[in-house]
Image (spheres, rainbow, N blue to C red):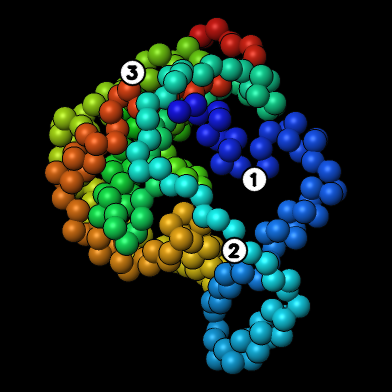
Amino acid sequence: YDIPELIRTNSIIGWIDSIQKTTPQDLRRAKDKFLVKENLRIFIAGNLDNLDDIKNIISVNLKMVKSGEVSLSPNMPEAIGRPKQVKFENTYEDIGLGDEEQATIELEAVLPSFNPDADLKKIATQRLLSHVMSDLAFEKLRVENKLCYSAGSGLSSGTTFQSMYLESKLDAQHIEKAVSLMEEIIDGVKEGVYEQKFIDSKELIINRFISNERSTADILDSTVSSYVKYNSNLLLGDLIGAMEAVTYNDTVDFAKEYLQRDRFVLEIVKPKTIKPTA
């Protein structure tokens, strides 16, 4: 796969030239084709004491929405191949951003999307592993080696794929050392050398999920996001239950299957002018 092409096709907007070529007629055709009753999904959260009234309001408004054909679901690949190019290096100016003093690095692996009905254990394992890797990145890059102020791990979801990554923002002269430490973390996760870190972190990570205060807007955002990612509602209780059942060996097996070194792409964005080390 090609990382830039995946990112572009994942966005409904595309590149700047896509926007520049779009005409009012294109927008009208898209509206008529996609903004139809058959493609609507309605979410309700909050105070539901007047649920019948809410349903009546929705029903009245639905009568004014145009009918059409259900849009086809995207093709979800069962497997993701290796990247065609394993390193991208640019300046902030090259990619249309304002210049910054520090560089940004990201070591990213693209994975197939998971289905909560069939892959809940994998989703739970991935969430736990991402948090453990985030703590390891901060400890190794920031605390032990003082290479940066920020370092961590994260997850990103596309329409037909997802990714796991390690990232940091740091002075450009530290990039090589930081990448080496990130690769050390990835290899260590696969080799099973962080068992004590997992044991020490698991309960704390799960408690973070449980203790986060959630407003009505948070619940709606989470539900909509779940349908966008999985086409179903991944309930927090189900996810927490699955996370509690994850073992350390599950994280090692997950890493061996999805985090092979040759699946990662290194993305580096540097300042236009790199200041010499003091």
Q: Nearer the viewer, residue 182 or 19?
A: 19
Question: In which image quadrant can residue 163 be found?
Answer: top left
Q: Residue at x 15, y 40 (%)?
A: 195
Q: Which of 26 and 2 is in front in this view?
A: 26
User: Which residue lies under the disc numbered 3?
Assistant: 180
Q: Seen in the image, is 167 located left or right of residue 196?
A: right
x and y, in percent, of residue 221 in the image: 54, 63
Looking at the image, is mark 2 or mark 1 nearer the viewer? 2
- Mark toward the start of the polypeptide (2 vs 1): 1
Decide: few, some or many residues near mark 2? Use Cα within 10 Å; few <14, some 14-19, many ≥20. Answer: some
Q: How far apart are marks 3 and 2 (CA)?
A: 48 Å
Residue 33, by quadrant, is: bottom right
Q: Which residue is drawn at 33% across and 18% down?
A: 180
Label 1's element?
Answer: loop
Of the pair 21 and 108, the residue shown nearer to us: 21
Q: Is residue 205 left or right of residue 35?
A: left
Instruction: Kindly give the residue lying farthest to the right in the view shown.
Output: 24
Question: Which of the two discs, 3 and 2, sits closer to the camera?
Answer: 2
Q: Which amino acid does label 1 sit on?
A: Ile
- Residue found at x 64% / y 11%: 273
Residue 242 percent across, percent down from the top left = 25, 60
Residue 76 shows in this picture: yes
Mark 2 element type:
loop
Left or right of residue 247: residue 151: right
Q: Is residue 206 visible?
A: no
Q: Say which element carries label 3.
A: helix
> Which residue position holds label 2?
70
Image quarter of residue 220: bottom right
Give whichever of discs 3 and 1 has the lower sequence position. Answer: 1
> Could you tell me the amino acid type at mark 3?
Ser
